[in-house]
Image: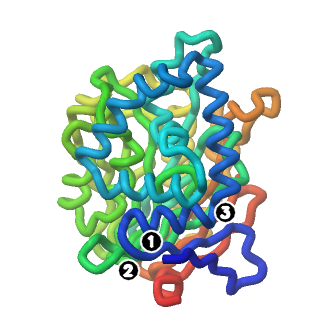
């Protein structure tokens, strides 16, 4: 089935792609629509890991167990990725590598070139009578800046639920909102039980189809996962919560909250890596903002996500030009109003990039 690039609004700066069919068909449509962007990312990460000793047969040897774990435990997500590779005209392993960056990066830390620590995402949820809001800043390597788009997935009957997800083109959708009114943001976490297993990005794509809290817990707790994430979750009319996982453990924290890149659950914090100053600074600033002026509208969340007052790294994180593609920046910012089934996406730092509105009902019926 051919992909469709939606362009009904002439002022859109973020490409929106609608992909229908079974997992492979959806992936192929995504790959075709984002072929140039995917090609750029794939080339970057091929060189990135080659400089650190992971290339050719060595890369196949190291990545192979992760590929097999993903195919065994989450075949649908693996098929989306295989279809994307075919649609974009790139080798599957080359596309798998960025989708397993968080698994492969530690294995490359002692290569010829050191791997810098990457400060990753920030998110928060807010509930009020008749309103459930979720905001997320996607912090990632600046090499992927400019490759951001919005994916609309319409599964075949009985194969899943329709969803809308902003993402860097080379990656499986991981954050966003589905037609049931469930939304999630995702934060990178590291713990001492990290292992070979299903890559985190595959698990987060699986969780994006959740229909309830219990379903989200089940989906984020996939057996055999390689490591964990912090999932900031909300459901229209159903409240908000945070699910923290490691490779072998899981905790649910009830209520709306902020999250960055360190464990909040005390038991998981004991096996988590040392909290970075950047993660603590962003988290404490979001908590401070929530206390000072509780947000009531999507625009309030947009202001929070554009904030620069945290130290040493702001919520609206900007890459250091001296670090080139390895610097960390906000690739995109997302705000969801779950009851209204609306999403706003800024393709870059939200302090400068405009938020563009996406009506979930409208795009699903297009």
Secondary structure at numbered mark 1: strand
The answer to whether residue 284 is seen in the rendering is: no
Q: CA distance from mark 1 to mark 2?
A: 27 Å
Secondary structure at numbered mark 3: strand
Residue 267 in the image: state x and y as whole percent.
Answer: 23, 29
Is 154 or 335 nearer to us in this picture? 154
Disc 1 crowd rating (10 Å Cα; few below 14, some 14-19, many 20+) is many
At x 48%, y 70%, the residue is 164
Q: Is residue 345 above or below residue 290?
A: below
Residue 36 in the image: state x and y as whole percent.
Answer: 70, 56
Disc 2 crowd rating (10 Å Cα; few below 14, some 14-19, many 20+) is few
Q: CA distance from mark 2 to mark 3?
A: 25 Å
Q: Is residue 198 above or below residue 276?
A: below
- Numbered tag placed on residue 211 in the rendering: none
The residue wearing badge 3 is: 346
Cβ–Cβ below 8 Å for labels 2 and 3? no
Secondary structure at numbered mark 2: loop
| Disc with the residue nearer the chain's start (1 vs 3) | 1
- Numbered tag placed on residue 153 in the rendering: 1
| Disc with the residue nearer the chain's start (1 vs 2) | 2
Is 309 or 327 nearer to us in this picture? 327
At x 50%, y 26%, the residue is 105
**Quadrant of residue 196 in the image?**
top left
The residue wearing badge 2 is: 130
Cβ–Cβ below 8 Å for labels 1 and 2? no
**Quadrant of residue 142 in the image?**
top right
Q: Is residue 318 above or below residue 214?
A: above
At x 72%, y 35%, the residue is 325
Q: CA distance from mark 1 to mark 3?
A: 20 Å
């Amino acid at each position: 089935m051919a992909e469709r690039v939606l362009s009904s609004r002439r002022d859109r700066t973020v490409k929106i792609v609608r992909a229908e069919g079974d997992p492979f068909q959806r992936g192929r449509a995504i790959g075709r629509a984002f072929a140039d962007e995917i090609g750029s990312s794939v080339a970057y990460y091929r060189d990135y890991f080659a400089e650190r000793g992971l290339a050719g047969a060595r890369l196949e040897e190291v990545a192979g167990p992760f590929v097999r774990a993903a195919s065994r435990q989450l075949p649908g997500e693996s098929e989306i990725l295989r279809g994307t590779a075919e649609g974009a005209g790139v080798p599957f392993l080359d596309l798998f590598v960025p989708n397993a960056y968080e698994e492969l990066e530690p294995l490359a830390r002692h290569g010829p070139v050191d791997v810098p620590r990457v400060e990753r995402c920030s998110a928060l949820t807010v509930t009020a009578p008749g309103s459930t809001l979720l905001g997320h800043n996607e912090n990632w390597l600046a090499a992927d800046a400019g490759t951001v788009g919005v994916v609309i997935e319409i599964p075949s009957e009985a194969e899943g639920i329709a969803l809308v997800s902003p993402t860097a083109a080379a990656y499986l959708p991981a954050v966003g909102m589905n037609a049931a009114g469930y939304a999630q943001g995702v934060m990178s976490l590291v713990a001492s039980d990290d292992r070979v297993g299903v890559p985190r990005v595959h698990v987060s794509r699986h969780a994006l189809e959740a229909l309830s809290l219990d379903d989200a817990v089940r989906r984020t707790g996939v057996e055999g996962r390689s490591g964990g994430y912090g999932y900031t979750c909300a459901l229209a009319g159903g409240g908000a919560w945070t699910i923290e996982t490691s490779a072998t453990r899981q905790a649910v924290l009830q209520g709306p909250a902020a999250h960055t890149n360190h464990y909040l659950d005390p038991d998981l914090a004991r096996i988590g890596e040392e909290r970075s100053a950047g993660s603590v600074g962003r988290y404490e600033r979001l908590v401070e903002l929530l206390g000072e002026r509780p947000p009531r509208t999507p625009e309030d969340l947009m202001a929070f996500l554009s904030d620069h007052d945290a130290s040493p790294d702001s919520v609206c994180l900007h890459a250091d030009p001296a670090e080139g593609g390895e610097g960390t920046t906000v690739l995109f910012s997302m705000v969801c109003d779950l009851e209204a089934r609306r999403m706003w996406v800024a393709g870059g730092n939200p302090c400068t990039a405009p938020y563009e509105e996406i009506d979930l009902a409208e795009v699903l019926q297009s």
